[in-house]
């Protein structure tokens, strides 16, 4: 039992001390280096508590940095140098991100090529969709169907360009990796790209990465009962690479099956082989992550990256953030396809964002082409669907120190939601639109 009842966070807030947070942090570090022993993590957490009990009295409230120092020492003392290294790196990266947060948050992304951003901005200005004010004006003038047409046409042109670039390398390609952060529109784009290339006589075989998740019991879980499925380490990367490598050599492999209802993976379920005229089509959050396809030379891969690259400013002249639109998309999709309350998605988003920053964005420059999946007409639709919820969450999370991330995102989205003209007639949105992946009503099966 711990003598310590509270700890001081870096923000200065005092929160309840829980051993489970230490155990989870250790387990996450272990997973990052290939370990998955929860009992060992719990045992090490107990030892950390013992050290803290000797070091601090009932009346003392240690700082979070003091607790983390003890965790590092316990890991090293018990011979877990690799886990300690992962823990230290994770800790230091968090500190560095906090230092850089103000700078990063006020400047455009440095990861997307400038010419791509410029092209999208030029399109936005040309179509009078570069500010919330100009978007509102067009919606009020009854131009919503026209905005839908303009947006869908621009997206279709992007998919067609990707298909053309793939065709230029089709003789050497073994796989097409369609990747990007959560809710960027990968599934619909994969379908559209496959349809586009099928018409030209090319055949693809889909490789379902989701079947390679580890059992739910092997995933880190936090104090709120939330699992982190967002990291590449949630997947059996070694088996994925092995199977893809064998498929590219013309061999047959037996694909596992993952039951999401029970959180259980069943090995050796479905035989799979590539025919001579077939190419692997892989839709994956972590398609750019090197470990997933490390055995295959890059000349055999075409890597396509998606992101809703909105170029639209609020009334204060600040560009709205791409991650906020993806959060809204995922809220809507999760509520339709997974029966999740949007509030659950909001509270889970810090895992999503953390993994993107560590495991997706650093490899963005390795993509062969980037598709912009943003649709400016999304904003009025989202205002009609979720504006009241964000206003409610902003008030609910305001004084909750353990939900500061949720409060920050909810309040930021609430601010720009208040500026948008609401529009609830979705009939002009095509049934095969990438937006239907999130709001429902698609002709595609997901």
Image: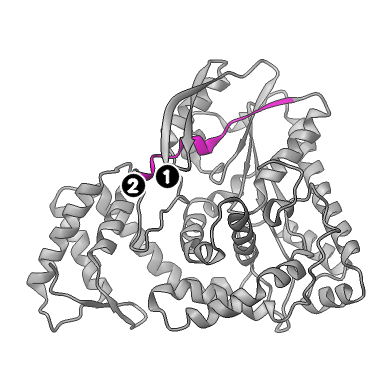
Q: Is residue 207 magenta?
A: yes
81 is within the stretch colored magenta: no
Question: Residue shown at 86%/73% (left/top)?
Answer: 139
| Relative horizontal placement of residue 208, taking residue 187 as reference (left or right) | left
Camera-nearest residue between 39 and 426: 426
Question: For this rendering, which residue is in front, 293 or 151?
Answer: 151
In which quadrant will I find the C terminus?
top right
Disc 2 secondary structure class: helix
What's the CA distance linking mark 2 and mark 1?
8 Å
Q: Is residue 172 above or below residue 262?
A: above
Q: Which mark is residue 404?
A: none
The quarter of the picture where residue 410 lies is: bottom right
Looking at the image, tell me whether mark 2 or mark 1 is earlier in sequence order.
Answer: 2
The N terminus lies in quadrant: bottom left
Residue 31 numbered tag: 2
Contact, mark 2 vs mark 1 (Cβ under 8 Å) = yes
Give x and y (percent) for residue 39.
Answer: 21, 48
**Who's the residue at 42% across and 34% down the image?**
265
- Residue 372 visible, this angle: no
Say which residue label 1 marks.
234
Residue at 13% across, 84% down: 59
Determine the secondary structure under disc 1.
helix
């Amino acid at each position: 039992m711990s003598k310590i009842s509270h700890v001081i966070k870096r923000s200065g807030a005092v929160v309840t001390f829980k051993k489970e947070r230490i155990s989870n942090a250790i387990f996450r570090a272990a997973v990052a280096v290939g370990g998955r022993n929860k009992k060992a993590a719990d045992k090490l957490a107990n030892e950390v508590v013992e050290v803290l009990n000797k070091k601090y009295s009932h009346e003392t409230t240690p700082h979070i940095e003091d607790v983390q120092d003890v965790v590092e020492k316990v890991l090293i003392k018990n011979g877990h140098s690799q886990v300690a290294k992962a823990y230290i790196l994770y800790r230091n990266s968090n500190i560095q991100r906090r230092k850089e947060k103000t700078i990063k948050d006020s400047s455009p992304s440095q990861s997307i090529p400038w010419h791509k951003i410029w092209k999208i901005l030029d399109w936005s200005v040309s179509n009078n969709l570069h500010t919330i004010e100009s978007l509102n004006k067009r919606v009020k003038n009854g131009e919503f169907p026209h905005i839908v047409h303009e947006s869908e046409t621009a997206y279709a042109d992007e998919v067609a360009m990707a298909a053309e670039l793939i065709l230029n390398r089709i003789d050497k390609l073994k796989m097409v990796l369609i990747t990007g952060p959560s809710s960027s529109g990968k599934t619909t784009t994969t379908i559209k790209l496959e349809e586009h290339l099928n018409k030209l006589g090319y055949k693809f075989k889909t490789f379902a990465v989701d079947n390679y998740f580890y059992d739910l019991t092997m995933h880190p879980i936090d104090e709120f009962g939330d699992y982190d499925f967002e990291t590449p380490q949630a997947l059996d990367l070694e088996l994925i690479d092995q199977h893809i490598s064998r498929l590219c050599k013309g061999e047959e492999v037996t694909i596992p099956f993952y039951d999401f209802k029970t959180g259980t993976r069943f090995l050796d379920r479905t035989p799979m082989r590539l025919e001579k005229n077939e190419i692997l089509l892989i839709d994956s959050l972590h398609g750019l992550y090197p470990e997933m396809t490390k055995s295959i030379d890059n000349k055999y891969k075409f890597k396509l990256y998606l992101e809703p690259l909105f170029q639209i400013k609020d009334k204060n002249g600040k560009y709205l953030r791409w991650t906020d639109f993806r959060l809204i998309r995922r809220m809507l999709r999760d509520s339709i396809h997974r029966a999740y309350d949007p509030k659950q998605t909001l509270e889970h988003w810090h895992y999503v964002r953390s993994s993107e920053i560590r495991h997706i964005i650093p490899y963005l420059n390795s993509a062969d082409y980037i598709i912009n999946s943003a649709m400016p007409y999304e904003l009025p639709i989202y205002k009609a669907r979720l504006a009241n919820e964000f206003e409610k969450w902003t008030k609910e999370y305001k004084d909750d120190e353990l939900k500061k991330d949720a409060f920050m995102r909810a309040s930021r989205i609430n601010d720009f939601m208040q500026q948008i003209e609401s529009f609830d007639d979705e009939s002009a949105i095509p049934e095969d639109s990438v937006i239907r992946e999130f709001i429902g009503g698609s002709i595609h099966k997901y």
